[in-house]
Image (tube, grey):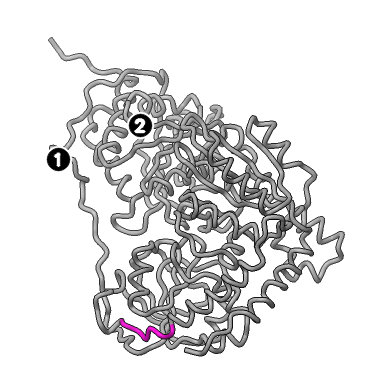
Amino acid sequence: MQPSVPTTTVVQATFAATLFDEWFRHGLREVVICPGSRSTPLAVAALRHGGLRLHVRIDERSAGFFAIGRSLALRSAVVIIVTSGTAATELHAAVVEADLAEVPLVVLTADRPPELHGVGAPQTIEQRHLYGGAVRRFEEPGVARADVASAWRPLASRCWWAAMGVDGDPGPVHVNAAFVEPLLGVASELPRARDDSGPWRAATHVPLVSGGVDLRGRRVLAVVGRGVDAAMVGALGELGWAVIGDATVPATIPYFDALLRDTKFADVARPDIVVRLGALPASKVLAERLREWSAPIIAWRGAGRLNDPDGLIAFVRPGLPNVTDPQLRATSTYRAWWTSAAASVARWLASRDAADRVPDEPAVARAVVAASSEHDVALVVGSSMPVRDVEWWAAARSAPTFANRGANGIDGVVSTVLGVGAGGASIGLIGDLTFLHDVSGLVDGLGSAGGRCVLVVVQNGGGGIFSFLAQARALDDDDFELLFGTPRPHDVVSVARSFGHHGESVTTMGALHRAITDGLGRDGLSVIAVRVGDRDDNVAVHAEYVAGVAEHWGVSEP
């Protein structure tokens, strides 16, 4: 008697189940799913696996950034499933962010089979290479066939390790999988897995190298960014390097942006050598000083992608600095001088703090960072002014800190905050336009995972960062407001409450601290609106702060 031939429906279900079984073996634990019909085999396979946490979100754009938040929190790849058509296009912004920020994602887009393309079938668009060069790998396995079942696990494995960056930088991978109807089936026996639990190819390790670099007795300024952790910051400090970094890097010397705005400080702080690891901070004044100083810049690749828009890096070394190499030991007096200057600024800023003080944007950034460190809760910082105010005015971070600084947009920041906090806790610091731009993230909130999330929204009546730019001075007030200020009348608290979340407004720094603490003790999402001065006032406040730093950093020269 001939063995029965499995139907296409069974083969599709088995194919999808095999993908998730293999990914689970490699470490997948969470899947983000957007409802859709053509993606049924994928969604049901994730559900029936039994070992995966599922996050179901109805808006694909929000879901993409929520998946980024989960990947950041887990430090591992997350799978996101969407159906065919425009649903797949809605992920493009998140894929671009994941590419530039090196966030591992496996993007599964369901598709119609070839015979339904070009004939007007609904929800059918061209999805091949939809995300262009933004993905680390593109796979289009076609409609699943039983005779190539042995290729399914290797397909899953190479996609996982491409996303995790085994052979390069981590980032998004796109699998465009076609399915035919009927879509709902029961998987048969899966193709045999390897006997061991390891990957199909071994992960590489980042070497420690010196590359002939001799920094003995030199004044070394290390500029570090995304991809550098607290352990590396500490090791570089032990070498005598003064380590400054972007908002996402813990334990660096704070207030560097404010300090470098003072010409006298910048002149004294001129380093002999600049070392780069990881991404660049947001600080424009740091970029200006690096150009002015013309000090040789050496970079190590091992912390991730090196941004160099000004073309200043003179030498690039592989791996990471070999912190045991005596030739990399710099003069420690330079680092001590930077540290003392920052401590002087910290004391001056602390003298301005008072519970009954009316909030301004630098003070809010300081308070949110302090709360994140105090409660050891992950922080997500919005683009535009929040990330700059954290680099500019906040103390060194001790809790994990994230920002969507790959493409530097305000897309999906609310959803990223929720993604980081789902099943745990997070704090977000964003502006009012960023809040409204991703208001669809409020629809699902933290979802079935639950958790505690505090979203601090700075209400300054529009796009605050533009008031610092030339457009604010070159255009008439009405024209500037129309094109750049873009104030919106929506009340943040009312918007939050309309979606069923806690919302409150605070008018003092003491009330802000209490609201954050209360929010972290409350299940669900708490939105805290902080009323600050208008955008012109904010420019003046920053100028006042900068002048104060120039008066108070003073310590003897190194």
Quadrant in the rendering for residue 318:
bottom left
Coordinates of residue 48 in the picture (x, y in percent): 34, 23
Find out whether the residues at labels 2 and 1 contact each other: C-beta distance under 8 Å: no
Using the image, determine if residue 417 lies above or below residue 268.
above
Identify residue type, mark 1. Answer: Asp
- Closer to the camera in the image, 312 or 377: 377
Q: Which residues are magenta?
A: 329-334
Does label 2 or label 1 sit earlier along the sequence?
A: 2
- Per the rendering, the mark at residue 52 is 2
Could you say where residue 556 lies in the image, as x and y percent from the top left? Answer: 52, 89
Instruction: Give the percent coordinates (x, y) of residue 507.
Output: 73, 50
Q: Which mark is residue 196?
A: 1
Q: Is 474 contained in the magenta span?
A: no
Residue drawn at x 32%, y 30% as measured from the top left: 51
Q: Of all residues shown, which one is farthest toward the top?
A: 1
Viewer-nearest residue: 37 or 97: 97
- The kind of secondary structure element at disc 1 is loop
Q: Is residue 168 above or below residue 72?
A: below
Q: Position of residue 478 (x, y in %)?
A: 87, 59
In magenta stretch: residue 331 = yes
Work out whether 261 lies above or below 358.
below
Label 2 SS: loop
Q: CA–CA distance between discs 2 and 1?
A: 21 Å
Amino acid marked by disc 2: Leu
